[in-house]
Amino acid sequence: MSNHGASDVLHSTQIVIEQALLRLGYDQTIIDFLKEPMRLLCVRIPVRMDDGTTKVFTGYRSQHNDAVGPTKGGVRFHPDVTENEVKALSIWMSLKCGIADLPYGGGKGGVICDPRTMSFRELERLSRGYVRAISQIVGPNKDIPAPDVMTNSQIMAWMMDEYSRIREFDSPGFITGKPLVLGGSKGRETATARGVVIMIHEALRLKGIAMKNARIVIQGFGNAGSYLAKFMHEAGARVIAISDVHGALYNEEGLDIEYLLDRRDSFGNVTNLFPKSISNAELLELECDVLVPAAIENQITEHNAPNVRAAIVVEAANGPTTLEATKILTDRGILLIPDVLASSGGVIVSYFEWVQNNQGYYWDEQEVDDKLKVMMIRGFEHVYEIHRTRKVDMRLAAYMAGVRKMAEAVRFRGWV
Ligand SMILES: NC(=O)C1=CN([C@@H]2O[C@H](COP(=O)(O)OP(=O)(O)OC[C@H]3O[C@@H](n4cnc5c(N)ncnc54)[C@H](O)[C@@H]3O)[C@@H](O)[C@H]2O)C=CC1
Ligand SMILES: O=C(O)CCC(=O)C(=O)O
C-alpha cells in the first residue's frame, strides 16, 4: 500500500480549522491552540516475535484537546502511520465529537506495523505493549481508545485486559469496540456503516434520488465498506462496484454482495479471489449516484475530482478527499458529506458503549440504532443549515459545527 500523503492531511486540516474559527469570530490565540494537539506521545514498543527475536515498533497517541471532556478515538495498525497523520486524525475526532455533541475531545493512536504479516500471538503482544507504553495518559476518564484501520474487537479485548491488569481492577470503560461478552455495545461493529447509510438517505432525499436501484460505488471492503455494502443492498440500492487494496470489482447490474461478504477475509480483502474488472482509480470515476470512499486518505484529489461522475460523495473514510478536490466537487454541484459528519457513527456508538459500561446497564440493538439515527440526523441538519445560511462548502460547515463547542469550552475554562 502506498504512502498516502500524511503531512498534507494535517496541513489541510489546519487550514480549515483556521477558516472555521475565523468565521465563528475567534482570535488567533484560540486558532494557534486548536490547530495542534495539546499532547502527543511517541512510544517504542519492544515485542518478542514468534521466532525468538525482538522487534521494536513505534507508536503514537495524540490528544487534540480535552476542554470538553476525555479524549476519544481509535487506534490504527498500519505500515504507513506517521506522527502527522495521527495528529490530523485526532483533530478530526474532536470535530466528530463536536458535531455529534458528545462529551469528549478528540484523540487517536497509531502503531507502525503490518498486522497482515504478524501472527495472532505477536499481535497480542504488540497490543498489550502499546497499552503499557501509553498507560499513563489514557483511562476511562482521560482518553478512551477504540478500533480503526486493521484493529478489531479482539485487539480491543487484549488492550482492555492489559489496562485492567495495570490498574488492578476491571476497566471496561477504558476502551470501546470490545466484544459483547466483555462489555461491548450491540451495534458498535456495524455503527460506522449504519451512520453512513443514514447520511446517504438524507443526501439522496436532498438530491431527489430514490434509494431503490440507486447506484452505489464503495472503495474499501473492511469494517466500514463491507457493512455499508450489505446495508445498501438490503435497502434496495444497487452496489455496482467495491474495492480493496488489491483492486476493484464492477458490475453495472449490481454485485452479489452476500457472496462477497462471505468470502472476504478479516482485513477486508476479497478482490484477490476474482479476476478484477477495474482498478481503484477507475472505480472512483465510475458513473453512479453515490460514491463512498471507505478506505484511506487522499483518494479524491485535484487530478481525478474533475472526472468523478457521482451525484453525491459520502466520506466514510477519514480524509479521503483533498481540499483542492473538495473545491472542485463543490463547484461541480456534487453534494459532499464530509468525513467528520459521515463517519461519526462509530464514535457515537462508542460513546453509547462507554455510557453503558459506566452505568452497568446494557441496551438492545434497536435502542442503539434509534439513538444513533437521532444523533446523525441532528448533526446532518446542523451542518447543512450552516452550509446553506453561511454559504460555505459542506466541509467548512462541518468544521464550524464541530469546533464551536470546544472553542467555547476552552474559553470558559480560561485557558486562553
Ligand atoms: N472502523 C471504524 O469504526 C471507523 C473507521 N473509519 C474510517 O474508515 C476507513 C476504513 O476503516 P475500516 O473499514 O475500519 O478499516 P479496515 O482495515 O477494516 O478496512 C480497510 C479497507 O480498505 C482497503 N484499502 C486499504 N488501502 C487501500 C487502497 N490504497 N485502495 C483501496 N482500498 C484500500 C482494505 O483492503 C480494506 O478493504 C478509515 O479511513 C477509517 O479511519 C471512520 C470511522 C470509524
Ligand atoms: O469509536 C471511536 O471512539 C473512534 C472511531 C474512530 O477512530 C473514527 O471515527 O475515526
Image: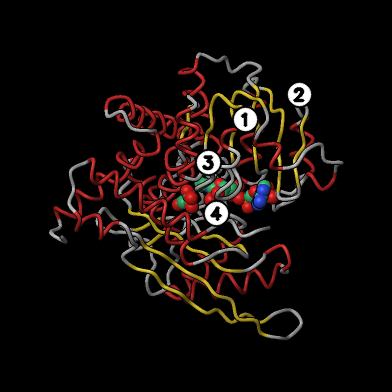
Give the class, few, some or many, for how many residues have Cα within 10 Å of label 3's Cα (few <14, many ≥20): many
How far apart in space, not on screen, are marks 3 and 4 (Cα)?
Answer: 10 Å
Helix, strand or loop for disc 1: helix
Of 200 and 250, the residue lying toward us: 250
87 left or right of 305?
left
Given the image, on which type of amino acid does mark 3 rest? Thr
How far apart in space, not on screen, are marks 4 and 2 (Cα)?
Answer: 31 Å
Do callouts 3 and 4 mark residues in contact (Cβ within 8 Å)? no
Q: Which residue is mark 2?
A: 252
Q: Residue 370, located in which quarter of the rendered image?
A: top left
Give the class, few, some or many, for how many residues have Cα within 10 Å of label 2's Cα (few <14, many ≥20): few
How far apart in space, not on screen, are marks 1 and 4 (Cα)?
Answer: 20 Å
Given the image, on which type of amino acid does mark 4 rest? Asp
Q: Is mark 2 within 8 Å of ligand 1?
A: no
Helix, strand or loop for disc 4: loop
Residue sitting at 52 percent across and 44 percent down? 188
191 left or right of 412?
right
How far apart in space, not on screen, are marks 1 and 2 (Cα)?
Answer: 18 Å
Q: Which mark is residue 40?
A: none
Upstream in sequence: badge 1 or badge 2: 1
Upstream in sequence: badge 1 or badge 3: 3
Q: Which mark is residue 231?
A: 1
Foreground label between 1 and 2: 2
Q: Is residue 21 above or below residue 178?
A: above
Upstream in sequence: badge 2 or badge 3: 3
Of 74 and 253, the residue lying toward us: 253
Q: Which residue is mark 4?
A: 148
Residue 156 in picture, x, y percent from top left: 55, 60
Helix, strand or loop for disc 2: loop
Q: Which residue is mark 3?
A: 192
Q: Is mark 3 within 8 Å of ligand 1?
A: yes
Upstream in sequence: badge 3 or badge 4: 4
